[in-house]
Image (cartoon, rainbow, N blue to C red):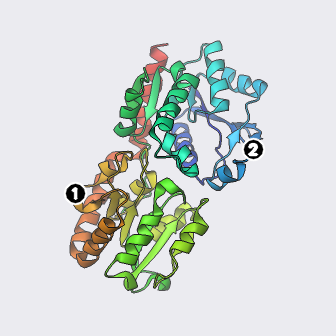
Amino acid sequence: MKILLVLDQFDGANNGNTITARRLFSILKKHGHDVRILASGESRDDKWGLPVVKVPIFDGLIRKQGFVFAKPVKEIVEEAVKWADFVHIVMPFMVSKMATKMAIKYNKPMTSAFHVQPENIWFSVHLGNFKPLISLTYFVGRKYIYKYHKFIHCPSNMIKNQLVKHHYNADIRVISNGIESDFVYRKKDKDDIFKNKFLIVMSGRYSYEKRQDLIIKAVKKSKYEKDIQIFLAGQGPVEKEYRKLAEGLTNPIMMHFLTKDQLKDLFSQTDLYIHASDAEIEAMSCMEAFASGLVPVISNSKRSATPQFALDDRSLFEAGNSDDLASKIDYWFKHPKERKEMEIKYAESAKKYALEECVNQMEKMFNDAINQK
């Protein structure tokens, strides 16, 4: 089947949506499909390239988040859609709106994904807790693009429930974005820089909703602060702010963007993974961590799907509460034997989110959409 994936950014691997799309692309090709991309950047044999849109005032902030918007060019979008047997919309922005209309025009079966949580947009400008604006964003998304789609992919029940609450009338399929097979339980001796330190890691954008600030505050309150090394793997607009907050730690904070192989190497030396985010559709980074044999400590935020992965309350802390997080850090520091036992259980629990099986479920959704066309 000739499958077209439509999104704003496909090149590079510096944000979760791009990484998810690249994985889907790879496995669909492995399953024998002819898969091509419609996105910003240069054209190539398997991709129709589009110009990048510069957003006045906010362009710098958007790029710091590791994202760009594609400018829809009618002739290019039309050519891509006409080529396809099937169109899958990954992102809900301008190029996807045009591709959706073209798919309707040429009677192409299509599905869409809901990967952009409204909070992810508005936290960057300190409006993520303004509920009327969040509800309005769901409304605009439905009217702008999702009303045209009979099938919507959601990575978690949490976000499906939000779509139902906001009157998205579609067949909503909950399918995990999946964990790549090379994220497996693996331990190695610590590099010299981490020797004799309790290594705490969080992977993800440096953005307000991710709440890396809570980790810094909690470690400062920990009884074992002098023994703890924080490593925040990522990039983002609030890096300077978090570096400033971390001043005074016995072991200076480490903040770097890592490649996939570098992240796997870091995980193999990590003692505890923390996912402090207030808003999260699924949290691929946390999934990769516990698949690698790390015990996670996860914010129990109601706007996050990530608490579903906790195997017991020792892996949950009260959202926004650095005191509670500090107590969980101290617990796992004091109980290394329990931590080792749970590492194995978490790695085992990750197997149900295997990427291959998740893509199989995506293919079933595609076929169901074709059959109902």
Q: Nearer the viewer, mark 2 or mark 1?
A: 2
Please state the total of marks drawn on the protein image.
Answer: 2
Relative to residue 126, is residue 239 depicted above or below?
below
Q: Residue at x 45, y 74 (%)?
A: 230
**Mark 1 Cα-neighbour bin, 10 Å: few <14, some 14–19, many ≥20:** few
Q: Place residue 355 in its image quadrant.
A: top left
Q: Where does label 2 land, which residue? A: 56
Is any part of residue 268 visible from this angle?
no
Indicate which disc residue 222 carries: none
Element under disc 2: loop
Under mark 1, the amino acid is Asp
Tell me if I can see residue 137 in this picture. Answer: yes
Query: Quadrant of residue 214 in the image?
Result: bottom left
Q: Quick check: marks 2 and 1 in contact, CB under 8 Å?
A: no
Earlier in the chain: of badge 2 and badge 1, it is 2
Please tell me which residue is depicted at 53% across the width and 49% down the height of the picture.
123
Q: Residue at x 34, y 37 (%)?
A: 157
Query: What is the spatial separation of the Cα atoms under label 2 and label 1, in whole angstroms?
Result: 46 Å
Of 247 and 12, nearer the camera is 247
In the visual, does 163 lie left or right of 123? left
Residue 81 percent across, percent down from the top left = 66, 23
Relative depth, front residue between 180 and 119: 119
| SS for callout 1 | loop
Q: Residue 322 in the image: x percent, y percent?
A: 36, 66
Residue at (55%, 62%) from the top-left corner?
A: 234
Q: What amino acid type is highlighted by mark number 2? A: Pro
Q: Is residue 160 above or below residue 211?
A: above
- Percent across and percent down for residue 266 are 47, 70
Q: Which residue is mark 1?
A: 312
Q: Position of residue 181 (x, y in %)?
A: 42, 53
Q: Quadrant of the N terminus?
A: top right
